Image (cartoon, rainbow, N blue to C red):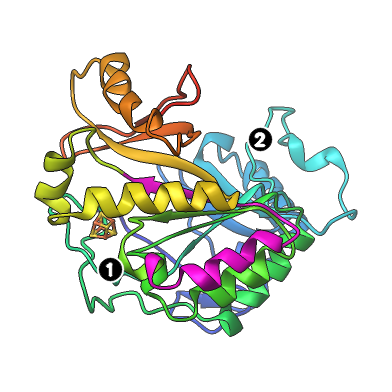
Amino acid sequence: MPNFHLAVSRESANGDFHGRVTEMLELLPLGPNIHYYLCGLDAMIDDISNWLEQQDINYTQIHREVFFMPNKRNDDWLYSSKGEKRGYIQSQLLHELWFHTGTSCNLRCPFCLEGSKPGDDRLQFITLEETKKFIDEAVEMGVEKFSFTGGEPFVNPHFISVLDYALDFKPCLVLTNATEPLMNQFAKIKRLISKPNRLNFRISLDHPDPQKHDESRGKGNFKKALDTLGRLHREGFGVSIARLMLDGEDGDAVDKDYAPFSTRRESHRISPSSGFPTSTNRVRSRRSRKSPKAV
Ligand code: SF4
């Protein structure tokens, strides 16, 4: 069983050391079989790494998660004192930020990765007040897109106000089952089309066979989801489909099975598909080669 020593330089915590890093260095146990996990600002992590290397600790035993003070770094930290390249996380760069809106869902699909169901409050609903600060910070960091998943995001009574705020800054993607929680708020959602950024929906249609979809999601839910997808599309929102992907399936053949839904009169122009695994599959996604087409 490994032996862990926790040392923190600032926050109160239950550790073996609590104080200045420079004082802590003298107390670190040293040895060829010990690994060191360092997390903090670049200058501090550099100091500790260099000190460890001077004690003949191999750089492969030193694991670093580095945070930078923007504009206050040079390139020294990219290399160990022996000139080897170091790995790092560019924590000041953020392309996409995902929010979990809460674990509650109006459905209870047997394959749900989240284990969601009605009234599930393992993760409580996010609110606009608590989300704002993360959106603001992400925008400062140059985020390009916000994405939201649950549970069913539209079960969350605060969700539309969160979307409304986020859409002032960046495009948003919402993963939804497109049934009653969304349908019942369609009038409010419609208004989001006038926001400065595009709102996109990824809607679950597990199988091209409505009956198979409804076996897990409940009778009539394929039709509801497909109709909602069409309504959203006609309002000008971006739409795409998430489906189940089975082991060993012929993806092109399954894609073709979805085609009839795009030839209905409303002709949904569907953006790239995503295949989500059943519990025994691995996650994959694929782009549709033809358009308009459902998956
Ligand atoms: S609709 Fe989605 S979140 Fe809800 S139970 Fe089904 S898979 Fe889970």
Residue tagged by mark 2? 86
Q: Quadrant of residue 16?
A: bottom left
Asked whether mark 1 and ligand 1 are closer than 8 Å, the reply comes as yes
Horizontal and vertical percent for residue 233? 52, 46
Horizontal and vertical percent for residue 220? 18, 54
Q: Identify which amino acid the numbered label 2 is placed on.
A: Arg
Residue 105: assigned label: 1
Residue at 55% in and 44% down: 62
Crowd rating for badge 1 (residues with CA inside 10 Å; few <14, some 14–19, many 20+): many
Horizontal and vertical percent for residue 238? 56, 45
Q: Indicate yes or no whether the magenta region holds residue 194.
A: yes
Residue at 38% in and 48% down: 203
Q: Please, which residue is most extreme toward the front here?
A: 265
Up/down of 59 relative to 90, above or below:
above
Q: Nearer the viewer, residue 254 or 71?
A: 254
Asked if labels 1 and 2 touch by Cβ distance under 8 angstroms, the answer is: no
Crowd rating for badge 2 (residues with CA inside 10 Å; few <14, some 14–19, many 20+): some
Q: The residue tagged with tag 2: helix, strand or loop?
A: loop
Up/down of 201 relative to 10, above or below:
above
Q: Quadrant of residue 217?
A: bottom left
Q: Identify which amino acid the numbered label 1 is placed on.
A: Cys
Q: Indicate yes or no whether the magenta region holds residue 210.
A: no
Mark 2 → mark 1, Cα distance in angstroms: 43 Å
**Region in magenta:** 183-204
Residue at 27% in and 32% down: 282
Image quarter for ligand 1: bottom left
Horizontal and vertical percent for residue 66? 66, 52
